[in-house]
């Protein structure tokens, strides 16, 4: 699966994550979350001569193909595929980043709007126009993350749910067959 969320650009396989530019300041929280939330058999490996090498900023993260158990509301254990776990972490990091940007914009907007309310001038109107422009760009980024990634993600979830249903049906048939044979 290819992940292209804002600043997180990665190729995710069933066993590993290949990150483009893992040392970039915005990507570091994602790398930290991967390290914290995903167990791994082999440590992170950097491709290239040193962490400062900018020609090959690619990081590989491997879990050996293991899936993590995720407790559901009833306390039972469900297992999510590695790819979904990585995608979930990526979405959390990007949403947190965008939320921080919204909070900063809101924090910057109040003093400018207060100044405009006190004194209507060309300078203050330009500040408000600039804030509105920033808000419009930020809204477009949020919508892009949601719309571009929600539909393929939902498609993957539906496929995963279908596969689980098929497996449960097979287990039920096997259980019924064993019950018939033992009678």
Image (cartoon, rainbow, N blue to C red):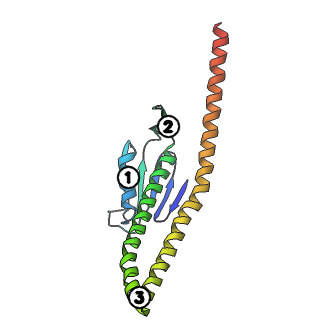
Q: Are marks 2 and 1 in contact (CB under 8 Å)?
A: no
Q: Quadrant of the C terminus?
A: top right
x 39%, y 67%: residue: 103
Side (left or right) of 53 relative to 141: left
Q: Depth check: 48 or 29 in front?
A: 29
Of callouts 2 and 1, which one flags the residue occurring earlier in the amino acid sequence?
1
Q: Residues within 10 Å of mark 3 (few under 14, many from 20)?
A: some
> How far across and down, in percent of the image, does residue 172 sit?
63, 23
Question: Where is residue 52 drawn, in percent x and y?
Answer: 32, 67
Q: Which residue is mark 3?
A: 124
- Please tell me whether mark 2 or mark 3 is closer to you in this view: 3
Residue hosting label 1: 33
Between discs 2 and 3, the one toward the N terminus: 2
Q: Quadrant of residue 49?
A: bottom left
In front of the other: 91 or 39: 91
What's the CA distance linking mark 1 and mark 3? 41 Å
Mark 2 is surrounded, within 10 Å at the Cα level, by few (under 14), some (14 to 19) or many (20 or more) other residues, namely few
Horizontally, residue 108 falls left or right of residue 151, namely left
Helix, strand or loop for disc 3: helix
Pointer 1 or 3: first along the chain:
1
Q: Residue 66 location, x and y as percent? A: 46, 39
**Residue farthest to the front, as pictured:** 118
* Residue topped by disc 2: 79
In this picture, is 62 found above or below 166? below
Q: Is residue 169 above or below residue 183?
A: below
């Amino acid at each position: 699966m290819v992940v292209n969320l804002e600043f997180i650009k990665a190729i995710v396989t069933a066993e590993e994550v290949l990150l483009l530019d893992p040392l970039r300041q915005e990507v570091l929280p994602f790398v930290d979350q991967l390290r914290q939330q995903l167990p791994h058999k082999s440590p992170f490996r950097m491709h290239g001569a040193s962490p400062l090498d900018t020609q090959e900023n690619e990081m590989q993260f491997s879990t050996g193909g293991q899936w993590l158990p995720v407790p559901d509301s009833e306390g039972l254990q469900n297992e999510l595929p590695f790819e979904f776990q990585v995608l979930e972490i990526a979405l959390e990091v990007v949403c947190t980043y965008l939320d921080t940007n919204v909070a900063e914009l809101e924090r910057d907007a109040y003093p400018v709007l207060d100044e405009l309310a006190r004194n209507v001038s060309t300078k203050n109107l330009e500040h408000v126009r600039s804030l509105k422009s920033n808000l419009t760009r930020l809204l477009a980024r949020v919508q892009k993350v949601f719309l571009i990634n929600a539909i393929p993600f939902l498609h993957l979830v539906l496929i995963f749910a279908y596969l689980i249903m098929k497996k449960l049906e097979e287990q039920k048939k096997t259980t019924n067959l064993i019950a018939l044979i033992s009678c």
